[in-house]
Amino acid sequence: MGNKQKKLTSIEVCAGAGGQALGLEMAGFEHVALVENDARCCETLRLNRPKWNVLEEDLNKFDGSPYKGVDLVAGGVPCPPFSHAGKQLGHLDDRDLFPAALKLVETTKPKAVLLENVRGLLDPKFSDYRQQILDKLDELGYKGEWRLIQAATHGVPQLRPRAILVALRPEYWEHFEWPEPTHPNPENFVSVGDALYDQISSNGWKKADEWRVAANKVAPTLVGGSKKHGGADLGPTRAKAAWATMGVDGKGVADEAPGEDFEGMPRITVQMAATLQGFPREWKLAGRKTSAYKQVGNAFPPPVAAAVGTAIRQAVALATQVATVTTTDDSVADDDQIATFSASVEPQAA
């Protein structure tokens, strides 16, 4: 049996700057459409992947019928309805796009669903709403589960907990396993100093080595804000204080790395912020500094998306293989056959 697995197809909604889309590409998914209503985000997506089918549309008005039979519906629906930084109006907030995402699932009938949001969605006050979403998915023929995943446990140098919903059709769900952390222990988290050293020292800053030692923690959560609020700084007062303990001025975002004789606490650049979100250095961001930073701050870290996407792909591939063996051999695949095939399904390079 060869190790080359067929790519699965996906629709990405609320695609933003492409963090989840990039991670799913790394996991072996091929995007048939990416839906995003922000012009700058669409520009970013096209800038990095000219061949992607980027659709600048309102998800509430998007017709998914041409994509019926796609393998995965994925996206990061807007966070403000559930964020601690907002009023947490939940389903009463007109920015809540979970109903639109579920409507798309009903229309396209994918094998799997992946939706992510802020940790606030897992607060007790939203327990009924989370269950309503699971009940709707059950009605549509899916089994699913909410899970809190901390980005730092997957090699992202940032404390970024995310609420993740994965749902699959029953024949795939029985083979799904949540991804294991690659960095399970806090002492092994990637630090800001290690992640940014090559960039912070790129202009010859003499104190870069000293700074690297001080910046020996993961970053606080980057916050992009909503379309109406938020700007190019590193978050609320408490976050700025945490940045200061690592020798970073969180009151703004710099245009470039500190110069050779710079004194004081440097500010990070948009590119450095993107690195802290897990984006590769080659990923470009369209627009001016504030727009670009907000795109980064609202993104889903690609390494986390890649890990969850790979777990989904493994479940689908394994279920398909079991069905093939059962049909071919007129018998149920044994544990050794299943284990051998599962080991062959590895993350794909972008």
Image (spheres, rainbow, N blue to C red):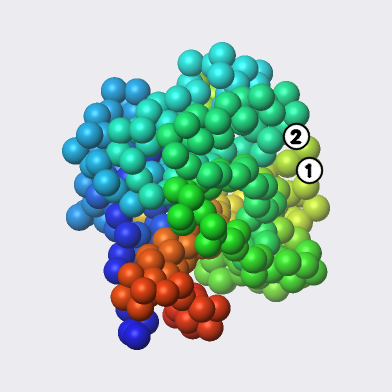
96 vs 124, left or right, is left
Of residue 285 and residue 308, the one placed in the foreground of this image is 308
Q: Find residue 45 and report its horizontal and vertical position in percent.
A: 31, 48
Q: Is residue 40 above or below residue 26?
A: above
Tell me where residue 33 sits by quadrant: top left
**Which sits in the foreground, 204 or 284?**
284
Residue 285 placement (x, y as % from top left): 38, 49
Q: Which residue is mark 2?
A: 237
**Looking at the image, which is closer to me, 154 or 42?**
154
Q: Is residue 346 above or below residue 237?
A: below
- Label placed on residue 216: none
Q: What residue is shown at x 42% (from left), y 61% (from top)? A: 316
In the displayed structure image, the side of residue 335 where residue 284 appears, left or right:
left
96 relative to 156 in the view: left or right: left
Instruction: Specify the amino acid type for callout 2.
Output: Thr
Q: Which residue is mark 1?
A: 241
| Amino acid at pointer 1 | Ala
